[in-house]
Amino acid sequence: MRYRSFTVAARKVAARKSLLSRDCEGAVQYTGLWISLLFCAACTLAAQTLPPVYESTLPDGLTLVALEDSRVPMVTMRLVFPGGSRRDPKDLPGVAAAIADLLLQGTANQAASQFQESVAMLGASMNAVAGADQISIAGSVIAENLPGLLGLASEAAREAAFPELEMVLYRQSRKQGLPRQHAQPGYVVNEFFRAAIFGGHPYANTAATAVSIDRMSRQAVVDYRDKYFVPNNAFLILVGKLPARAQLLKLVTEQFSSWPRKPLADTPKTVVPTPNRRLILLDRPGATRAEIRLGAVVATPRDADYFPLIAASLVVGGEIAGYDEAGVFSMAAQPANEGVGDALQSMLERLGRISKEPVTARELSDARAAAIGRSLLRLEPQAGLADELTRFKILHLPADYIATYTVRMNAVTPDQVRQAAKKYLAPENDTIVMAGDASKLQPQLQKTGVFEIVRAK
Amino acid sequence: MRHVEDVVVGRLLGLCLGLCLTAYPAVEMDFHLPFEKYKLPNGLRVILSRDTTVPVAAVYAIYDVGSRTEEKGREGFALLCERLAAEASRDSVEPKVDNLERKGAAHPDYTEFYGATPSNELGLALWLESNRMHGLALTEEKLKTAREAMQQEAHSFDGQPYRKALSEQWPALISINNDVTSDDPNAATAADVSKFFNTWYAPNNAVLIISGDFTIAEAKKMVEQYFAGIPSQPQPLRPHPVEPARAASKTVTVHDEYARVPAVIVGWPAPKRHSADWYALDMLDALLTGGRGSRLDREVMNGRQSVLQIEANLGWPSSAPMDFKDPGYYAAMLIHKPAFSAQDIVDQYQQVIDAVAATGVDSLELKRAKALLRLDKANSLQTALERARLLGIFELLDGDPGLIDRDFAARLAVTSDQIQAAAKKYLTSARRDVMVIEVK
């Protein structure tokens, strides 16, 4: 094959050949020349200057969030309903996911195939996704057909039919898919990891089970939809080449105004559990590799500790995810059987070090540059911007979150990283879930602690 | 799953939508990308395209060398050099953050190196690219390592279904210029490779594109600083592959020991790049295979329930229609249910094409395909990297970066008559080559 591509890990300039020395406070010396503005994301990049975000609440309660981006003649849409899988009834995990999967499979007016044809005729694409905190209808369309896209999104949100036949097919295919999912160690480990760190909190339930799939009646799906798919519990996020403000408001009102406002149902009060370290080993006899997940519940993205935690997670090679009521720090590894003890020790040592010693200036500036760079590259396409605005609304982030991300990331100090790491990431707080051949792994785990052994299904 | 009634209703509804759409102003691709082009004394062409919406900048370098332009006895050098050049820049840096990740690929008719970074890292990205253009500093030891890595990688694809057909057997069948020599130029010495590199990866054989958030004056200063000192080389004579006139269509059968499901590949020599016929074929492809509701989806995948998966393109299985200078081809791979014979599938496929050749396409169908193409185009133009890539390809392969605006307008101007004529002229059973992939 001639067209293979490769990846250059050309990540950091320099030092090896002394071509260049870094100096975060000012300029950078490069082969004897002073060049300003280079090589240090942490020092030179100012706040992200986004075009102003326009927000308005319509009479029916729908909140419109609009951001003009006229680089290309298209519009990206997110119609977002807060709720998501965390509002799945206790005995019905997976119902939010089922709604997302079935939402575009036909409405009162159009069968599934017609609906999809209508989307294509507009020069549009549309899909629906369920997250832990929300269900979103996501779409994009060539600019002049925005009215058509809004019409179809409104139709799906209000009039999705969930036909009995589609329900039967859905239950069948979900059930058939379960064994395949459970055969993947990564999937099973994630399930156990979330269940372990979140305990009784609904974030623990991520997916449907064989039992809940059987219970997933059309009525259950419709009940959930009727409860959360109301205009006063919805955000319409539009990013792109938009009509003038007055026209846009008129357009959105036309498409959504006949949608009756409804009192929101009381949402059950939830409490995020305090860290409770669990060590779990899912026995998969015969496996030659282990799948390791290690981590803990951490601060939410609204918390002052969140930015230091982003830096800490980058330094130790982990990742951090933000939800409305919690953040999750995790590290993953897939070592061969004989390397499991070492891999685990190395992960725990990194966490031990970062919660005791301050990170070096170099580590911190690399972490800042990585975080800022990722965030900027994510915001480049409309879809990234729309997702970020979704996150911003769902996570109740401060109004200047996106604009000041760079500044706040740059303001993180080594001491803040150490304190946040000590509070949340210290090795003795971290839950460890791993899947693998227990007979091979157990002898290597004694140093770490006593693992509960779970027989894999 | 799709019932006949659905299709009829779908069409009626589509008609209504089509009429409704006309209520809005007919916008074609209202996209214009400003850029500035100049040349350094060493022959390096530079294109700057500024858009400051997002603080991201892309640096894209493209070289007029690819796997089809290697001289005899130098087969495999393009890929090898691409690897070595990657290695060279890896030597000069140490790992930092993934934002500075730079990638590269050797294509049939060009080689590219690219990456997007936060705009304040533009200088570093340029420095990395200039470092690569400066040369390989190759030793026999490094060459040996690169060759071993290539071999290992080649073997890592062993055992993948359809791999041999896609990467070796089909290209060799459809074009004499897709030679299938091994990717391991064993006989090469470090001196051979260095000579090849210095000749083909010289500034006068390259285009450098900077796109995104930067200031023109600063970018020019940095380009001058990092690239002006790289010496130019005598301009190499690029081989222009010529395909002989075809005597007859060919059908071959190959056996794939790894695939579980049979497939056929069908292909035809394509017209000249950017010709009206080429655009017509491109649009025909969108009508035939452009997702759900396209002709093949309706008539073969859903109608006959025979084909499971279709991939097709001008230049398939290379990554994009734009990949081939001349000559290229149009090809499709149809993975099908074992209950149908390869001949059944080829006949069903040809029937769908023949129907277009006989009666053309209706305006609604064309409108739908164009709308989807426009979305796709708008989507791809959002990133600085993709804009840089298109500017680079149009400059290197066509000598005209302004095609970034005009190419798409030409695409959208295609008429139903042109599509019908192109189907009749090019996609006939007499001109086609077929590869049958049998499985155990």
Image: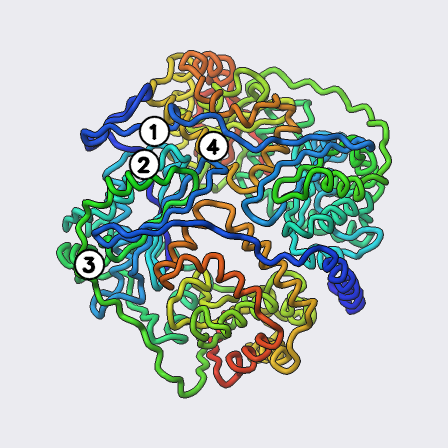
Q: Chain of mark 3?
A: B
Q: Quadrant of the N terminus of chain B?
A: bottom right
Which residue is farthest left? B191
Residue at image mark 3: B199
What's the amino acid at mark 4? Ala
Q: How far separated are the C-alphas under marks 4 and 2?
A: 34 Å
- Whichever of callouts 3 and 2 sits on the residue coming sooner in the sequence is 2
Residue at image mark 2: B123
Residue at 32% of width from left, 30% of height from top? A38
Q: How far separated are the C-alphas under marks 4 and 3?
A: 45 Å
Q: Disc 3 on helix, strand or loop?
A: helix
Q: Disc 1 on helix, strand or loop?
A: loop
Residue at image mark 1: A37
Q: How far separated are the C-alphas under marks 1 and 3?
A: 34 Å
- Whichever of callouts 1 and 4 sits on the residue coming sooner in the sequence is 1
Q: Where in the figure is residue B231, as x and y percent of width and height? A: 17, 50
What's the amino acid at mark 2? Gly
Disc 2 crowd rating (10 Å Cα; few below 14, some 14-19, many 20+) is: many
Residue at image mark 4: A332
